[in-house]
Amino acid sequence: MVNVGKRSGRPRAGEERLSREAILTAALRIVDDEGIDALTMRRLAATLQVNPMSLYHHLPNKAAVLAGLAELVFAGLELPDPGDAVPWDEQLKEAARAYRNGLRQHPNLALQVLSDTSAVSDVVVVTMEPFYRALDRAGLEPRQIFEAANTLIDFIHGFSLGEASVRAETFELAPDLLTRVRALPADKAPTLKRIVGGLGVEGLAYDFDGGFESGLSTLTAGIAATARRR
Amino acid sequence: MVNVGKRSGRPRAGEERLSREAILTAALRIVDDEGIDALTMRRLAATLQVNPMSLYHHLPNKAAVLAGLAELVFAGLELPDPGDAVPWDEQLKEAARAYRNGLRQHPNLALQVLSDTSAVSDVVVVTMEPFYRALDRAGLEPRQIFEAANTLIDFIHGFSLGEASVRAETFELAPDLLTRVRALPADKAPTLKRIVGGLGVEGLAYDFDGGFESGLSTLTAGIAATARRR
DNA sequence: ACCTGAACACCGTTCAAGT
DNA sequence: ACCTGAACACCGTTCAAGT
């Protein structure tokens, strides 16, 4: 057991325990395993068997740790581009599916990631080529491509946020929702009552994959209409 | 100045300082004025000129305060329903615009609100009638109505999250984004480079209202296509 | 029933001191 | 240059005691 335990001072060459990368990796593990609230500087330091203050030599503060995690998640994102072998709408859907799957890898981090503007801005640069390529093939003008890509990304973000939130919950939403819609006064929301009531508990038990595909189809159909109209 | 200051024990009838509602109102003000991080139980108590522990007689813990805030924001949401006087797609867009505007009232709370599953579930019951009515008029089947409404809500959530995040930032995103896209190797993302580069700084300076309308148009066009296909 | 004061077990972070 | 230990100014929350 050499070089282990609480030595003080600078470690000798080749035995550095700490680096920005090592810290972020450990932080990601904590967040994945125990949630975002479990991540504290002291806990993180303990995991790395290091003094809490040592972290501050590699990252300026806790906010930087969180920003680093968002960056890490997006950096790990790779959208496979099926290219021109498939129709443009299928290319677009494939890229969207891959993006959603990337976000799903770390549900406890979804909130942090999606609200980190500079991380989201990063992702545009790193992963948006397949989106732009598909929309270009669809025949949209540059401005329309830009806006359609943003709309699609917004949908995926909203969807992922909902998916991550529901996964974190324990209780079942569908029966509760149904009960409350049925309890509404008859004249208050007639259409809502008829539609939601008609679907029943099994109809409302949300199928995330199906819901995502449905959204993608609606969006590609809308984009196709835009392309036809140019 | 009677009845002011630090008296101990139960207040006499008519002079209660504290209630769940009063606490949440004060909390909302702090979050609106100074951000979510400024909201602590101790700070909240100080604002109400009360001992921190007093809060716990009205709300079980801080999580309940945050959940109460989400509830409060959604409760204040009222979607005007233009009804059948306008085409279904305009009715749908009006409801969506009102929903977005409701979320914009408290940008510092957006993250909390959008990730609170039970609050989001609430909103369905309270405000979704115009959405369902418009989609019904469009000629969709019940299942399609349910999914189209969810897709639209997801888009609004993703959009609002982006809007709230960017508002919190100080720096300008567009120039930074442009610089980095232009710095990409020529063969890496040719379409992205061509489209984003072509738009230029002024083309990328994001117009939230325009982006939202563009998304709504794409979605309603896609929904119209679904309706035609049934 | 409602409010309080002291206390507990935590936080993030600064600063001076080690090697 | 990097790590440490003590300290500061905070947190949320429990618990027993007041009226």
Image (cartoon, coloured by chain):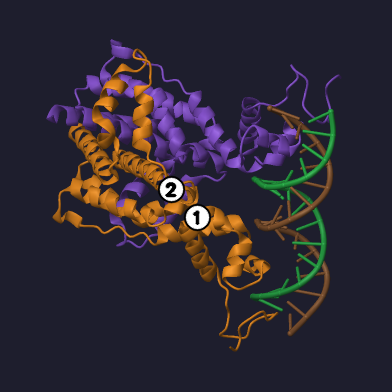
Chain colours: A orange, B purple, C brown, D green
* Along the viewing direction, whichever of A20 and A163 lies nearer the viewer: A163
Q: Which residue is mark 1?
A: A35
Residue A12 screen position, x and y as percent:
62, 86
* Along the viewing direction, whichever of A135 and A111 lies nearer the viewer: A111
Q: Is residue A40 above or below residue A201?
A: below
- SS at circle 1: loop
- SS at circle 2: helix
Q: Is residue A158 above or below residue A7?
A: above
Question: Mark 2, chain letter?
Answer: A
In this view of the protein, can residue B206 be seen by the observer?
no
- Number of labels in the image equals 2
B76 relative position to B225: left or right = right
Q: What amino acid is labelled 2 in the image?
A: Ala
Kindly indicate whether the residue at mark 2 contacts the one at mark 1 (C-beta within 8 angstroms): yes
Residue A105 screen position, x and y as percent:
38, 57
- The image quadrant that residue B169 belongs to is top right
Mark 1 neighbour density, 10 Å: few (under 14) some (14–19) many (20 or more): some
> Where is the N terminus of chain B found, in terms of image quarters?
top right
Mark 2 neighbour density, 10 Å: few (under 14) some (14–19) many (20 or more): some
Q: Is residue A217 above or below residue A184?
A: below
Name the mark on residue A154: none
Extreme residue toward the bottom, this view:
A2
Q: What amino acid is labelled 1 in the image?
A: Gly
B10 relative position to A70: left or right = right
Earlier along the polypeptide chain: callout 1 or callout 2? 1
Name the mark on residue A168: 2
B48 relative position to A210: left or right = right
